[in-house]
Image: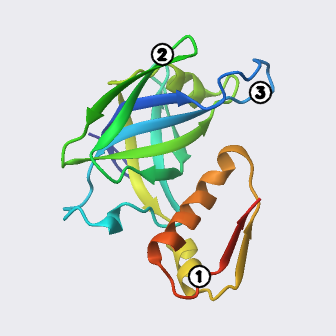
Amino acid sequence: ISTSKRGIYRRGKVVGVEYLTPNMPSSDSSRPVILLRLSLPKTTVSDDSADEDVMLPGTVYVFRGIEERGNMFDRQYTPVQIKRNNVFRDYSITMGETVQKSSSTSDQHEIHEFLISLVPNGRMSKFLLNQKCGTVVLVQGPRTNFRVLDKVEGAEWKSVVMIAAGTGTSPMIQLVNYYLWMGVSEMPNLYLV
């Protein structure tokens, strides 16, 4: 565990990396997308109820990267899902090929998934590209922006239109999952464009 002024960093184990855009041509303007799966220690005591399977809208995690020279840097990412059972798929990427193995987690860990756009020459992108299944990444969170949550819970919208592209859909997916999980009797119509 590493600490900073903002909080404690936990050790997350990389349990899956999947290229979602494997055939994207490589150029300075292309941004391949990966689905990164991390196993993180649970932050609360759980009775395995479904209420811990959905992230609240406005929730992010902070990843800490370390460059070859030892310089540290942080980036925020929005989780798109927590695995709802103890079984997950373990991926290993080698030259664009995906190798899948079955594994399971313990009751003390949760699997978090993140859609990440790999930015050409990006510091975190370079760091994440070097991560393999089983390596450890420092992660802080979850952090929830309660102003966002208060707006969502206090609103009586008839419709919600969300416009996003690429990995920008992650917060929108989080919002849709939240509404579905809540089972609100008068749920707004949700549109993701």
Pointer 1 or 2: first along the chain: 2
Amino acid tagged 2:
Glu
The amino acid beneath tag 1 is Met
Task: Tell which of 75 and 59 is nearer to you.
Answer: 59
| Element type where label 2 sits in the image | loop
Which quadrant of the figure contains the N terminus?
top left
For marks 1 and 2, give the CA distance.
Answer: 49 Å
The residue tagged 1 is: 187
Q: Earlier in the sequence, mark 3 or mark 1?
A: 3
Q: Quadrant of the C terminus?
A: bottom right
Residue 113 at x, y percent in the picture: 46, 44
The residue drawn where x is 70% and y is 85% is 158
Q: Which residue is mark 2?
A: 68
Out of 185 and 39, give the one closest to the viewer. Answer: 185
Residue drawn at x 50%, y 22% as measured from the top left: 67
The residue type indicated by label 3 comes to Ser
Question: Residue at left 61%, top 86%?
Answer: 155
Q: Is residue 103 rendered to the left or right of residue 66?
A: left
Q: Which residue is mark 3?
A: 30
Query: Which is nearer the N-term, disc 2 or disc 3?
Result: 3
Position of residue 165 relative to residue 184, above or below, is above
Is residue 183 depicted above or below 127 in this figure? below
Disc 3 crowd, CA 10 A, few/some/many (<14, 14-19, 20+) = few
Mark 2 or 3: in front is 3
Residue 79 appears left or right of 46: right
Using the rendered image of the protein, determine whether residue 5 is visible from the camera's viewpoint.
Answer: no
In this picture, residue 21 sits left or right of residue 104:
right
Which residue does the image show at 52% across and 64% down from the upper left? 177
